[in-house]
Amino acid sequence: MSTATVHCVRHGQVDNPDGVIYGRLPGFGLTELGHQMAERLGEYFADHNLVYLVSSPLLRAQETIAPIAAKFPELEVVLDERVIETANKFQGIDLGWHYTNLLKPSNLWKLHNPLQPSWGEPYPQIVTRMRDAIKDAARHANDAEAVIVSHELPIFITRRAVEHKPFMHDPRKRNTRLASVTSFHYVNGSLVNITYNEPAGDLVPHSNDSGYRPGQ
């Protein structure tokens, strides 16, 4: 029997003082707190049997995987476009607290089909590229483990797909917090279980405001 575990890690807190949807824009590295989250991830994985490391090419993901890679200097970090952030037509826009800026006519038309979604990369396309990357990582991690540092929505929507849950959801209730670890467990090449951990959960800011701000 062969086993493999692929840990899909969300990056740490992003330095985004203007609260814009940063999407795939260049820059947008981690805050000081985000770097603390990344260090916590490095400690969390230090005793794991990691043999394969993958990162989204975006800066925040590369900064998050750096402390993990430092614990495994013999491993090269593979940059994989398949695990990048989702494309988003609101990229560069500040949606405001409680999404108030969505009510502007210039933005409302982008919301005509939430099932696709019409404002960004189609959910099935996200799932296809993420599942391919996860399966490739599982093949590299035969009887071992791999880490993929990616982004909130790609990880979350892929989990919903493999658990046969609908794509429609409330983005404020995604179970993919900053620096969280969603682990896909394989036996003989077949996915048998998914687990979820928050090694830096005590570092994630808590707010009584139900508004959503990117990077928080």
Image (cartoon, helix red, strand yellow):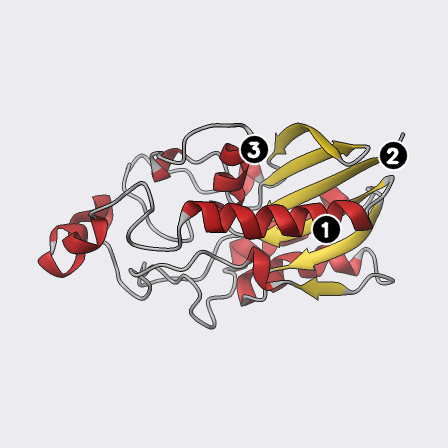
Helix, strand or loop at mark 3: helix
**Disc on the earlier residue, 1 or 2:** 2
Residue 68, given in percent of the width and then of the height, sits at 73, 54
Q: Pointer 1 and pointer 2: residues touching (CB < 8 Å)?
A: no
Please state which amino acid type lies under the numbered disc 1.
Asp
Kind of element beneath mark 2:
loop
- Mark 2 sits on what residue? 2
Residue drawn at 41 percent across, 61 percent down: 23
**Residue in the foreground of this view, choosing between 36 and 191:** 191
Q: Can you identify the residue that label 3 sits on? A: 162
Residue 195 image position (x, y, % from top left):
64, 29
Q: Position of residue 58 (x, y in %)?
A: 54, 66
Can residue 205 be seen in the rendering of this structure?
Answer: yes
Question: Upstream in the sequence, badge 3 or badge 1?
Answer: 1
- Marks 2/3: CA distance? 21 Å
Q: Is residue 84 left or right of residue 8?
A: left
Secondary structure of the residue carrying tag 1 is helix
Which residue is most to the right?
Answer: 1
Marks 2 and 3, the one that precedes in the sequence: 2
Whether residue 40 is visible to the viewer of this picture, yes or no, is no
* Left or right placement of residue 151 versus residue 4 in this view: left
Category of crowding for the residue at label 1, using alpha-carbon neighbours closer than 10 angstroms: few (below 14), some (14–19), many (at least 20): few
Name which residue type carries label 3: Val
Q: Which one is in front, 216 or 162?
A: 162
Q: Amino acid at mark 2?
A: Ser
Location of mark 1 (residue): 136
